[in-house]
Image: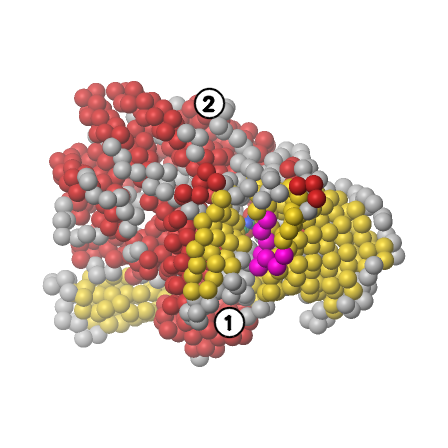
Amino acid sequence: MNTNISVEESTAPVEIFRTDYEPLPHAVTKINMDFNLNDRKTIVTSELTIQPNKLYKGNSKDLPLDGEEKIVKLLSLSMNGKDLKEGDDFTLAPGKLVIKNPPAGAVLKTVVELVPEDNFKLSGLYKTGPMYCTQCEAMGFRRITYYPDRPDNMAIFEKVRLEADKKAYPVLLANGNMIDNGDLDGGRHYATWTDPFPKPSYLFCCVAGDLGKIHDTYTTMSGRKVDLQVFSESHNVHKLDYAMESLKNSMKWDEDRFGLEYDLDLYNIVAVDSFNMGAMENKGLNVFNTAYVLADKDTATDSDFERVEGVIGHEYFHNWTGNRVTCRDWFQLTLKEGLTVFRDQEFSGDMNSKAVKRIEDVRALRGGQFAEDAGPMSHPIRPNSYISMDNFYTATVYNKGAEVIRMYQTLLSVEGFRKGMDLYFERHDGSAVTCDDFLAAMADANGADLSQFSLWYFTNGTPVVTYDAKYENGTFTLLLTQKSKSDKPLHIPISVGLLDKASGEEVVPTKVLNLKEMTQEFKFDGLKGEVVPSILREFSAPIKLISASGKEDEEALAYLAARDTDGFNKWEASQKLFTSLIFQAKDGGMTEKTYGYVKEAFGRTLTNKESKDYSIIAYALIMPTQNTLAELVDVVDPVAIHKARGAVKKRLARDFATELKERYDELTAAMEGAEFKVDSESIGRRRLRNVCLGYLCEIYETPEEQKVASEIAMAHFKNASGMTDKAAALGALASMDGEGATARDEALEIFYNDAAGDFLVLNKWFTIQAMADLPDALDRVKKLKEHPDFTLKNPNRCRSLVRAFTANVAFHDESGAGYAFLREVLEELDTLNPQISSRMAGALISWKKYNEKRGLVMKAELQKLADMKPISADLFEIVSRGLK
Ligand code: ARG
Ligand code: ZN
């Protein structure tokens, strides 16, 4: 046995390009693994069966295996039972073990040693709380064993055997089905698992821990019974029911909508506290960040419940879109992520309210993805290059990617889209493919020409479409002009409907216009009189729509805000009115005309007693987010936008003080004594009541007003029916000073004590304070960073304070103190968890967007990060893009 084969130091960051893709000379077609888990010493033995790769056209005869030499210490290496000789049979360089000329059918055996307890990157095999778990996407498997760690290598994981101390780790899980288990000497035990479906290494998973669980079953459409289990630490088992319910709903929905059935006899989900992302779709063994699986009324808000449902759906839907058909290379990530986000959005829309879901998704897209696409991280949904793939799990790949998928459906119809999906699975089940394959399936199944549509995969940036509308003698003419980063025009579906101006009736129901030229005219004939157009209904394309004149027709917006039959555009019209008014407030003062329109719409919505669509009402009253507003100007002054937004909110709050209080009281009365439910109506009621509370707390000038506001908020807090109301009240109280300061401090203390150490509730406690609108917010955050419950080692906790603060206007204080604080945190964090440090560095890279003074301070902090030695490849990529 050749022990401790050593390699030299790692090399500098390398950029990988999409167009350099080449198949491997050989493929690993089968793997057997053995995990021997011991404190601070885990031994992993792997046996890889190697076959020549038919797709390979090059001249190499060798098989390169990936492995992070500092994490996986290679203890021995043999082929077909014989030790291999370095130089003759293999070479070992940083990150790469190259096997020279392996014969067809060769079995390569490696033995490596790991220390999962020291793995704070949370990639590969690591320890979180009382359990071991793995995260392999994108490139974590190479931190477990030497392997062709790329998604086009799909292999059968024939046997995965786990062995550990039985008392400390009674539960041993891996992908697929368990085929053997038993006790061993010395208090140890083992379990062996097999997964019949070929998969890439990034879908591998194993877990060992002392876990509680809930169990249920689901009978698939063809009558197969599937066991469902959701695991967590025992003290959280009572918070797993909603996840289980959501899982069953997801399974049913995918059968109904896409004819897709689950394929194993067992579906396991494990909740872990330390996780870099939301969750992971490992075949038959999903791992979830506890934040996206645990939910009960006392610890989770309605939004948390919605997210649990959405993420459970998302990971389940990956079983077909991601696992059965996977990505050929990581540049194709949107193939599975854009598609699966689209699927989870549709699922959530069907489970709750389509219009509400659409509004929420577009709010998120505009607040996050638009900004990303306007800054230094801008990339097409299929990126052209990366240094660290983990940096490209972005809003663009996920959310804009989902918008691109939605456009296929808009262009081809729901039925046409289904045909395309059917053909996609017929052609590609069991293989690793590209975005082009998906597009081809959609085109071929529908006899459609989507060649121009393919430009969406190459074009970064948010396209702008301007419209010019004109009515004359029964004809309405719409002139659309597009501008994007593509020099050829994109194919953009623009959904349009027309309302008769006199009667308010919809005279032309929604019609999809195919904008395929740079400038294109669309005519609607035979109209009986003037019309008001409703353009980009349901947000039919991820673009910015602006009027050619540069000025919105506020009268038309007010008209649509009152009457549009398209729920999304009705909301959109009210948002556009808000936006005009906020920018007026910022640039010299609100005009009475615009305020009049906003006031009219606000009052009508607030006092609308006919509709039970409380969420829709609530969203119509909520102003555009700070980020959405920032996206609309060339030079951002966050403090000025914040002030202007506040001024509008305060004015409306005062003008509608009576109505707000009335509505608030009426909702309070309706909720009293009612059973607590998490359905659309109850969620909507709580949402609307909390919006009213938010406005009422804006009336906060005189000591008397401050007392009144803090009393309402405190009562709301103390009588809260669950976490939604409790967190909303604390959010309002947290920003109070003056007469409200005592109530604020009292509520914060009560909230902390009530949490009784609950991990997710404490995260909220940190977040609410980090976002507080107080002049000394930064000092408070600095103090919280030293709190005994704070740690940089847990990503959720870290985000709950530090990332939350980057959304606070105080982060942008012109002194630069907020920026310096973030930089200091990142310096520390980067040595622990580069995925998280690089993500949070995103708050500094868009310095060019800000006014010069602020921008230069931000840039200087970025430069300090760039000069840091050592720096992770992840953070290096983000800061160097930011400095370019
Ligand atoms: N595939 C996961 C999802 O469904 C994301 C995991 C990515 N993790 C990472 N470290 N890059 O969204
Ligand atoms: Zn995903």
Mark 1 crowdedness (10 Å alpha carbons): few <14, some 14-19, many ≥20: some
At 22% from the left edge and 49% from the top edge, which residue is drawn?
614
When asked about the image quadrant of residue 51, the answer is bottom right
500 displayed left or right of 522: left
Separation (CA) of disc 1 from disc 2: 54 Å
346 displayed left or right of 876: left
Q: Which residue is mark 1?
A: 425
In magenta stretch: residue 177: yes
> For the residue marked with disc 1, what is the amino acid?
Phe
Quarter of the picture containing the C terminus is: top right
Say which label, 1 or 2, has the lower sequence index.
Answer: 1
> For the residue marked with disc 2, what is the amino acid?
Lys
Q: In front here: 223 or 137?
A: 223
At 66% from the left edge and 61% from the top edge, which residue is drawn?
158
At 54% from the left edge and 74% from the top edge, which residue is drawn?
427
**Marks 1 and 2: which is nearer the front?**
1
